[in-house]
């Protein structure tokens, strides 16, 4: 049976720790109850900090402590989790150390502010476009030729400006519209500063996948798919419903083809289509439908049933039937009831959570400029347990937020 770790606050224990080997110190620090305790140990002396910020310890730490939800990255900054959320202390430390104004990133071609399009593994994917109105960012349609992109790490203040997608690549397919822009995940064994950016674009004829890798510094087209299997409906929004399967490294999209799911395998860069027949379900205009991977790694679709106060607000859950013998067999799984004094809007999904915006019904006036804007609650909902938590309260309406799962100093390494 392992002996208990000596309490870091004990002066006698502190005197003994420097005499132990690095391996024993790693074991002791990993048995501390919370990341906050490890952070305090890191501040105790330089040798402790060297071990705690080392690659070996960080790998073991991250395997033991999954990254917590620290808050939301929105159009104009970062909103940390607030008390009584369990991540609030770590989130505050992270917010104080990071720069989500992106002031360290040089101006883009259009001289409009940089704003986020994806967040993953400590990186933020930024874009700069000709027009920049936060009130309408959810509804923007942007041609591929107008995209300026950058990847940055707000904590280390490092950045990389991406080259524009070359005309010789874009020119093969006219009038391409960006509807899926994201950071591809990197493996545990890869160098922390290596990253990939994927842009999925389409017109009425074809869906094209563009990929950028920091290793080559160039864009290429690894995959494309004819729209004949999808229909000719163009995306009405750049903020499509999609989710990432961490285990199989696949991305799933639903918009604008509600009877289809578009699937991209990030490893093989193959694009395929899954029939869903979800067009039979009436989805109200209360934000985008959300996709989450179920326990058997099949996609599940969530949407709000009654977002306008006409009755109880429920989250409808539709899942793919297993063993049905039909690729179109989807069924209503269950409903998650929400307090009916609020109006809700779906914002996104990640790591098994749905993210919602909630406003008290008698305060539901979307005034983006008024100083008297009511409190807007941003919530997480665990799809496995139906547990709902308030993450933060902001006097601002956002149509899209990006959840930030990560670590504050000293557990975060530069990612760009």
Image (cartoon, helix red, strand yellow):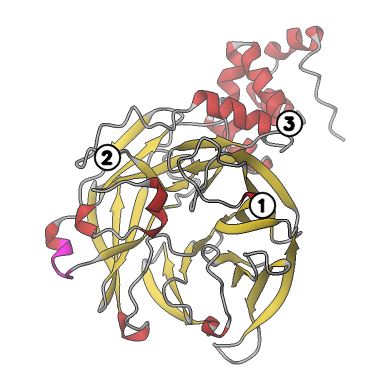
Q: CA distance from mark 3 to mark 2?
A: 41 Å
Residue indicated by mark 1: 362
Quick one: SS at disc 3? loop
Judge from the rendering whether residue 203 lies leftward or rightward of residue 169; answer left or right: right
Q: Quadrant of residue 406?
A: top right
Residue indicated by mark 3: 34
- Indicate the position of residue 23 as horizontal and vertical percent values: 66, 27
- 304 or 124, which is in the foreground? 304
Quick one: SS at disc 2? loop
Residues packed near mark 2 inside 10 Å, few (<14), some (14 to 19) or many (20 plus):
some
Residue 71 is at least partly visible in this image: yes
Rendered residue at 52%/64% (across/down): 248
Q: CA distance from mark 1 to mark 2?
A: 35 Å
Judge from the rendering whether residue 78 lies leftward or rightward of residue 152; answer left or right: right
Residue 112 — which label? Answer: 2
- 392 or 127, which is in the foreground? 392
Rendered residue at 62%/58% (across/down): 344
Residues packed near mark 1 inside 10 Å, few (<14), some (14 to 19) or many (20 plus):
few
- Indicate the position of residue 123 as horizontal and vertical percent values: 43, 41
Quick one: SS at disc 1? helix
Q: Is 127 part of what is drawn in magenta?
A: no
The magenta-colored residue range is 169-174
- Assess whether mark 3 and mark 1 are in contact (beta carbons under 8 angstroms): no
Residue 68 is at least partly visible in this image: no
Discs 1/2, front: 1
Discs 1/3, front: 1
């Amino acid at each position: 049976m392992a002996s208990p770790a000596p309490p870091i606050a004990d002066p006698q224990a502190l005197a003994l720790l420097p005499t132990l080997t690095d391996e024993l110190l790693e074991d002791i620090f990993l048995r501390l109850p919370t990341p906050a305790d490890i952070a305090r140990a890191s501040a105790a002396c330089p040798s402790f900090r060297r071990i705690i910020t080392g690659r070996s310890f960080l790998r073991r730490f991250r395997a033991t402590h999954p990254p917590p939800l620290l808050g939301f990255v929105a159009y104009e900054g970062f909103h940390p989790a607030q008390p009584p959320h369990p991540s609030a202390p770590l989130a505050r430390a992270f917010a104080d150390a990071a720069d989500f104004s992106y002031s360290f990133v040089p101006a883009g071609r259009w001289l409009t502010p940089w704003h986020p399009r994806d967040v993953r593994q400590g990186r933020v994917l930024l874009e700069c476009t000709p027009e920049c109105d936060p009130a309408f960012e959810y509804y923007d349609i942007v041609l591929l030729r107008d995209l300026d992109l950058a990847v940055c790490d707000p904590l280390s203040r490092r950045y990389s400006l991406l080259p524009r997608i070359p005309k010789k690549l874009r020119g093969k397919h006219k009038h391409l519209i960006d509807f899926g822009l994201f950071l591809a995940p990197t493996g545990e064994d890869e160098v922390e500063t290596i990253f990939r950016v994927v842009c999925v674009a389409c017109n009425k004829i074809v869906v094209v996948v563009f990929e950028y890798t920091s290793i080559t510094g160039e864009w290429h087209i690894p995959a494309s798919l004819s729209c004949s299997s999808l229909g000719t409906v163009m995306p009405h929004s750049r903020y499509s419903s999609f989710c990432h399967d961490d285990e199989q490294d696949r991305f799933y999209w639903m918009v604008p083809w509600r009877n289809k799911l578009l699937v991209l395998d990030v490893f093989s860069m193959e694009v395929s289509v899954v029939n869903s027949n979800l067009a039979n379900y009436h989805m109200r205009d209360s934000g985008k439908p959300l996709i989450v991977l179920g326990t058997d790694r099949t996609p599940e679709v969530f949407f709000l049933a009654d977002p306008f106060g006409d009755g109880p607000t429920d989250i409808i859950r539709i899942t793919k039937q297993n063993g049905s013998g039909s690729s179109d067999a989807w069924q209503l799984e269950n409903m998650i009831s929400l307090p009916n004094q609020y109006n809700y809007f779906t914002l996104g999904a990640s790591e098994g959570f749905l993210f919602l915006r909630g406003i008290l019904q008698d305060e539901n006036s979307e005034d983006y400029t008024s100083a008297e804007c009511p409190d807007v609650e941003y919530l997480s909902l665990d799809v496995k347990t139906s547990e709902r938590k308030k993450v933060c309260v902001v006097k601002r309406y956002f149509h899209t937020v990006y959840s930030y799962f990560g670590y504050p100093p000293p557990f975060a390494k530069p990612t760009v």
